[in-house]
Amino acid sequence: MSAEQATLAWDMPGLVAGVDEAGRGPLAGPVVAAAVILDDLRPIKGLADSKKLTARTRERLYDEIRAHALCCSIGEASVEEIDRLNILQATLLAMQRAVAGLRLRPVKVLVDGNRLPVLDVMAEAIVQGDSKVQAISAASILAKVHRDRWCEEIDVQYPHYGFAAHKGYGTAVHLQALREHGATPWHRRSFSPVALAIAQGRDPTAAPELSDPPRRAAGEGA
């Protein structure tokens, strides 16, 4: 399947999965993707683009999606994979893993955006799909909450960086912490602000390694 947006000329009967990602822009942490097949007999009210929802609403919907969807799955691509492949290819890899983790096989996958991962099922890219297709909205919520929880866990290990607040994005507080403390093992060295902090003499190994890396269980959710 081409990585460009594809439009299906017909609608196939069967299960449809929605796919979305979270964490392409931050300077640290994995990129996360989720795949969701909703149950038409158990509709979930309030599904929308995760960016337009409050954190409390996202958390509530996260639990509802996990409880009521036919199946759902979360996939990640690591910081090492992001630095080795680039963020786009790592995102597509996380999407592949999310779809592969579904307990049920969809006949069609709808992906937010204009690029498609390589899949062995029919797929369609939908620009702004997270605000148009409920299954994609559900996937965006799962991915966002999963990654936000990761940031809250990493914040306990590295409190000087403020991960719980900025979620890894390049805010003024985060950039200042990079200048003062250097890069943690979770920072993406291929991203220019991190590379600059390292080039300015901050020791990227100065922050202690995690003895048990925080990683919420990724995989089958229902």
Image: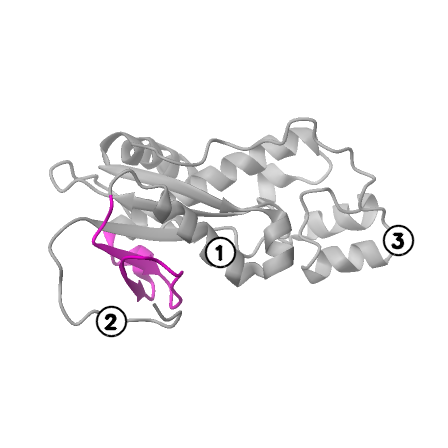
How far, Cα to Cα, is label 1 from label 3?
30 Å
Q: Nearer the viewer, mark 1 or mark 3?
A: 1
- Position of residue 33 measured from the top left corner of the image (x, y, whole percent): 43, 48
Residue ID for mark 1:
91
Three-letter amino acid code at disc 1?
A: Thr
Q: Which mark is residue 7?
A: 2
Mark 1 or mark 2: name the one nearer the start of the chain.
Answer: 2
- Position of residue 160 measured from the top left corner of the image (x, y, whole percent): 73, 36
Query: What residue lies at 53% left-to-right and 56% top-to-bottom?
Result: 90
Residue ID for mark 3:
201
Three-letter amino acid code at disc 3?
A: Gly
Q: Quadrant of residue 101?
A: top left
Secondary structure of the residue carrying tag 3 is loop
Question: In this picture, which residue range is highlighted in magenta?
Answer: 105-134
Secondary structure of the residue carrying tag 1 is helix
- Position of residue 188 measured from the top left corner of the image (x, y, whole percent): 67, 52
* 168 to the left or right of 207: left
Three-letter amino acid code at disc 2?
A: Thr
Mark 1 or mark 3: name the one nearer the start of the chain.
Answer: 1
Is residue 53 visible in the rendered image? The answer is: no
* 88 to the left or right of 42: right
